Amino acid sequence: MTRAIPVSILFALGLAAEDWPEFRGPGGQGHSASKRVPAEWSETSNIRWKADLPGKGWSSPSVRDGKVWVTSATDGGKSLRLLAFDAGSGKPLRDIEVFRLDDPKKMHAKNSHASPTPLVDGNRVYVHFGAHGTACVRTDGKILWKTKLEYDHRHGTGGSPALVGNLLVFNCDGYDSQYVVALDRRTGEVRWKSPRKGYQAYTTPLLIRVDGQDQIMSVGAHRAVAYDPETGAEIWSVRYAKGYSNVPRPVFGHGMVFISAGFDEPLFLAVRTGGKGDVTDTHIAWSLKKGAPLTPSPLLIGDEIYLISDNGIASCLDARTGTRHWQERIGGNHSASPIFAGGRIYFLSEEGESVAVQPGKEFKKLGANQLDGRFLASMAVTDGALFLRAEKHLYRIGK
């Protein structure tokens, strides 16, 4: 039997139902347990607070224990910082320089020196700035450890870390070298490092459980691999010859992993788990090209999977077969990953328009809301409120 980790188990392991502690929330798949979340807002209505953000960064908000955490790069990208705000009031609580660069390189127009999302676990915040360094910071501001790994991500990094037991796992897929690494969460020391051949990619790993075995699902250039969390050994992999610069985090359910594999040629794959070695010829259940996302992650709800392409085409597919139920242009350009909260799917465009859609086999738009500014980061949800990061501001929407 192949299954996803139930949300109830995640909460039982110490994660409160209202926390959003990492990229894409508890479980890493974009789901919130909040039942009542805002349906309408604007710059003049239903905004609890709006806080100024210094510098530049595209990390998504992480929320735990009444604090909202983001990263940013100030001083022309030289100062890489961890920021905390009070979730209730928006008051700044922490502003910590974690790393300092002598000569920061120019970033891609849709990237920054502070794009990976912080991961909050208890009184520790794990921050990752790609090749510039990874660190563990206590919530009172004390830096506990720092680690720097060598690779050339050139245009900036994008993938966020994942926590797997006592390991902090992330992808280092650069122009010059590619590998997945696991650090000891307590010390920052390398526990294992698994090299792989490919090209640059910007994805976040996902912990899955297959036939009673934990696996780390990591999407890279030209190939996605499931790793043994204890050793970093490859368990199975799937190939896609022309896919690189991957960004979306995969999702898992119905005994399949759903992967955005393309860039020059968009491609979305549903791959059955449970195999060993190269499963390209045996375990691909279905694939999709039209409407496949390059940047936003997919969203799996029940028997349906929802996608939003970078140019604003939303799709609903049967997760098991790939049969398309509907496909609609909702408009805008999209980098943020959709979320599911309060019975609604929220899509957030780069232009600040949030479109709410009812899950189901028939397309039903529930409404749209507009904010000012540029939005590339994904939403967070906590205690019935939405947290949105714009280029210059952080918002709490709702109660």
Image (cartoon, rainbow, N blue to C red):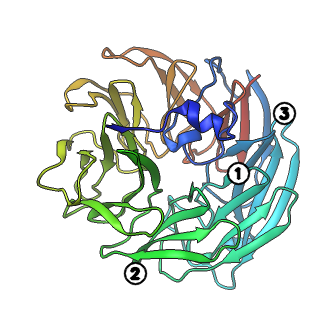
Q: Which of 309 and 244 is in front in this view?
A: 244
Label 3: element kind: loop
The mark found on residue 286 in the picture is: none
Type of amino acid under label 1: Asp
The local crowd at label 1, few if under 14, some if 14 to 19, many if 20 or more residues have their Cα within 10 Å, is some
Vertical relation: 194 (above or below) 212: below
| Residue 72 in the image, given as x and y percentages of width and height | 70, 61
Q: Which of 256 and 151 is in front in this view?
A: 256
Quarter occupied by residue 114: bottom right
Label 2: element kind: loop
Quarter occupied by residue 285: top left
Quarter occupied by residue 184: bottom right
Type of amino acid under label 2: Ser
Q: In which quarter of the image is the C terminus?
A: top right
* Residue 78 appears in the figure: no
Q: Quadrant of the N terminus?
A: top left
Give the residue drawn at x 31%, y 14%: 362
Q: Which of marks 2 and 1 is nearer the N terminus?
A: 1
The local crowd at label 3, few if under 14, some if 14 to 19, many if 20 or more residues have their Cα within 10 Å, is some
Q: Which of marks 3 and 1 is in front?
A: 1
Give the residue drawn at x 18%, y 56%: 279
* Residue 185 appears in the figure: yes
Vertical relation: 249 (above or below) 312: below
Q: Which of marks 3 and 1 is nearer the N terminus?
A: 3
Q: How far apart are marks 3 and 1 (CA)?
A: 20 Å
Q: In this view, does 396 lie to the left or right of 149?
A: right
| Residue indicated by mark 2 | 177
The mark found on residue 88 in the picture is: 3
Type of amino acid under label 3: Gly
| Residue indicated by mark 1 | 121
Q: Is residue 210 left or right of residue 147?
A: left
Vertical relation: 145 (above or below) 285: below
